[in-house]
Amino acid sequence: MEEPLTSKRSVTVADVARAANVSKATAARVLGGYGIVSDKVREQVLAAAAALEYRPNELARSMTTGKSGIIGVLVGDIENAFFSLAVRGISDVARMAGFNVIIANSGEELDAEKSAVDLLIGKRVDGLIVTPARCDRMEHLRDIHRVGVPLVLFDRSIPELGVDAVTGDDFDAAMMATRHLLDMGHRRIAYISAMDAENEFLGDISSISNSAVRERVEGVLKEQADAGIKKARYYVRLGATDQPRTDGVVERLLRDAAPPTALITSDSLVGLRVFKSLQTFGLSIPRDISMISFLDADWTTVTTPPITVIDQPVYEMGKKAAERLISRLNGKGMPAERTAIKTSLIRRGSVASLPLSDQ
Amino acid sequence: MEEPLTSKRSVTVADVARAANVSKATAARVLGGYGIVSDKVREQVLAAAAALEYRPNELARSMTTGKSGIIGVLVGDIENAFFSLAVRGISDVARMAGFNVIIANSGEELDAEKSAVDLLIGKRVDGLIVTPARCDRMEHLRDIHRVGVPLVLFDRSIPELGVDAVTGDDFDAAMMATRHLLDMGHRRIAYISAMDAENEFLGDISSISNSAVRERVEGVLKEQADAGIKKARYYVRLGATDQPRTDGVVERLLRDAAPPTALITSDSLVGLRVFKSLQTFGLSIPRDISMISFLDADWTTVTTPPITVIDQPVYEMGKKAAERLISRLNGKGMPAERTAIKTSLIRRGSVASLPLSDQ
DNA sequence: TTTATATATGAGACCGGTCTCTTGTCCAGA
DNA sequence: TCTGGACAAGAGACCGGTCTCATATATAAA
C-alpha cells in the first residue's frame, strides 16, 4: 500500500489548463462553474481535470471571493448535550445552504471566547453564532459586528449589542415551572444553577452575567412574588458546577430549618448532579422532594420516577439561529431581533401534590 | 449602536506598512513574527497595527504556507454523546497544539462522508480524523492519504488502508461482558446493535461493514463458543436504529420460545432504547432480564437499577487520535498502527445471578 | 457588404499574506 | 583606510484561485 506520495504539490487550474491546451482563464471558468465556455472545451477541461485528479483549493477560492463558506460556531461546551444538539441543528441548516461549520469551545470562559473569536474572524468565517459566556462583557463581540461579520447570539441575548439572538423563552418557562409547583401546593421552591459565582446565594440579580440564567431566576421570583411568597430569593442557589459542590449546595438546602419541598434545576447537567445528590442523601422523589429540570435530556425519562422537565426545542433553536444568520449572509437587511423559542412543560412523575398540612 | 460599517474592506499589512512608513515586507515581518526587525520599527508597526485594528487574514497566510492550522473531524453524529465527547478530547489536544478543529457530520452515510471528505480536503485541512461509516468502502479515504493529508481513523479500523486508527478494544470488551454474563449463569445472551442491515439476523460476520460492531459480535460469539454454547449467533440482532424498530427487535426476542436471559447493547443510544422497550413491555431489570450496555452514558447511573456498562474512555480516545495525528503532522514517520484503548467493565445493578434451575 | 451583437477564449491584475533576493548601513579587525 | 560580516529594510515573486478587460470569431441585422 505504500503510495509514493510524490505528488506532494497539488494540481492547480494552471496544470489542468496546460493538459487541456487551453488558457488558465478558460480552465478556471469550467472548473469554477462561471462564465461562458463551449461544450467542447468544457469536456476537454473536465477530462483533463479528472485525469489529473484536480481538487479545487477552497482557500485560494475564498481569498479572492472574500467568502469562506464557513460559519463559525462558538459554544460553551460541545460535550454538553444542549450544545451538541444545537450544533446539530445549526450544521444541518448550514449544510443545506452550502455552508460549513467550524466549531470552537469557550469552556464558558471569557478569555477563551475572545481568542476563539479572533481566530474565527482570522479564518474569515462568513458569519458567527456565539453563546456568550458573559452578557456584560462584549467589546469583542462588538468588534465582530464592526468588522462586518454577521453575528447571531445563541441561548443568551445582549440587547445593548443590537444583534440577532435566538434563545429560549427563559422568563416564561421559569414562570411556568414555578406556577406548576405552586399549583401543586409547594411554597418553598429552590432554584439551583451551575452559574459560577463567588457567593452561593443570590446577590444583585442584574449582575448575573448569563442572561438565560438571569431571566430564569427573574421568572421564578416573579411568579412567587405574585403568589405572595416572601422568602423566594433565599432559595435561589448558584455554583453547582460539579458533583461535590452540587452535593454541598443540596445538603445545605436540605439541612435548612425550612428546607425546600421542590427544586428547579437550571439545566440537564445540574439536574443530573442534583438527582445524584438526592440519591446519595437517600431522598425519594417525589415523596421527599419534588423536582423539575430544564431540558428534556435522555436521563430524565428513565429515572424512577421520570423527571418533569421544561422541554426546550434545542435542535429547533439551533436551526433557527443558523437560518437567521444565513438570511443575514444573503444580505437581508432586517432589524436585529431576539427570537425566543417557546418551551413547554412535560409533566412526568417528579412533582408531588402537597397536602395543605405540609405547606 | 449603529456602527457605520464603512470599513468593509479589512486592514492589510500594506495598510499598516503605509501607516507606519515602512515597506510591506517589514510590516509583514513584524506582524507575522518572523525575520529580523529593529525594536524601533517593530514598535512603530505594532502601534500602527493597533491603531488600524489590524487582524491577520489566516486565509492568505494559509495559502502561502500551505498549512491551514485546521484539523478536520468527520464523525457519524455529533449529537451522539460518544462522538461529542470524543470531539471534545480531540479539540482540547488540538487547541493545545495550536490547531483548530472543523467538524463535519456523515450521518453514518457513505455519500455524505465522501463529499465531506472532498470538502475538507478542499479547505486544505492539515490532517483528518474520520469515523468511517463503512469499513469496506474506502477509495475516498485512500485518496486522502494519496493527496498527502495525514489521516487517523477513529473508533473503527481498516487494516487494508494502512493508516493509524484509534479504537476501543472491542473484541476484548465484548468477551469481557459476555464472560461476566456467563459467570453469572446466563446461557442465552442477546446482542443488539443499531447497525443498519436488511436482515435483523446475523448473516456473514465478515460482511459487517463497521469494524467496531463486527469485533464486538466476534467477541460475544467467541466467548460463548469457548463456553460450548451453540445458539449464540441466533441471539445476535441488528437494525435497532430507532425506538419502534428497537421495540420490534426486543419484542421478537422476548416472545421467542427460548428468550434470552441477558442483553448486551451495542452503544448507549441502543441501550437507552432497549431500556425503554423493556420498560414498556413491563419487564423488570435484573429480575426478568439482565442487561449490559456499551458506554458509560449519563443515563446508565440514574436508572433503577443502574446499568452495568462497558466503560470506554472516549475522551481519552479522542485525545489519543488527535495526538497521533499531530505527531504525523510534525513529520514523525512512524509506521501506521492501531491503538486499541482498553475498556473496563463497571458492575452496577443490572445483571442478576441466575440460579442453576433457570439456566 | 458593412455594422452590430452575441459568444468564446486569452492575458494579466488581484486577493493578502510569506519569503527570497538585493541593497544599504554600521562596526570590528587588519 | 579598506574589507567583511552582521543586521535592517526594501522590492517583488509567489500561492491558486477569480474576475475584468481585450480580442477573435460567428451570426444576425441593416
Image (spheres, coloured by chain):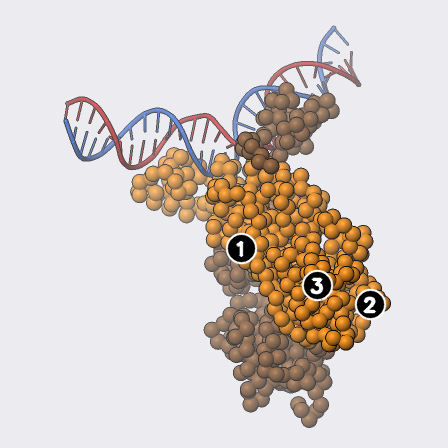
Chain colours: A brown, B orange, C blue, D red
- The chain holding disc 1 is B
The reply to whether the C-beta atoms of the residues labelled 2 and 3 are less than 8 Å apart is: no
| Element type at mark 2 | loop
- The chain holding disc 2 is B
Query: Residue beneath label 1, please?
Result: B319
| Element type at mark 3 | loop
- The chain holding disc 3 is B
Left or right, B10 with respect to B83, comes to left
Asked if labels 1 and 2 share a chain, the reply is yes
**Residue A67 percent across, percent down from the top left:** 59, 41
Asked if A252 appears above or below B94 in the picture, the reply is below
Pick the quarter of the image with the N terminus of chain A.
Answer: top right
Query: Residue beneath label 3, please?
Result: B227
Query: Residue beneath label 2, please?
Result: B258
**Residue B312 percent across, percent down from the top left:** 60, 61
Tell me which label, 3 or 1, sits earlier in the chain: 3
**Residue C18 percent across, percent down from the top left:** 44, 37
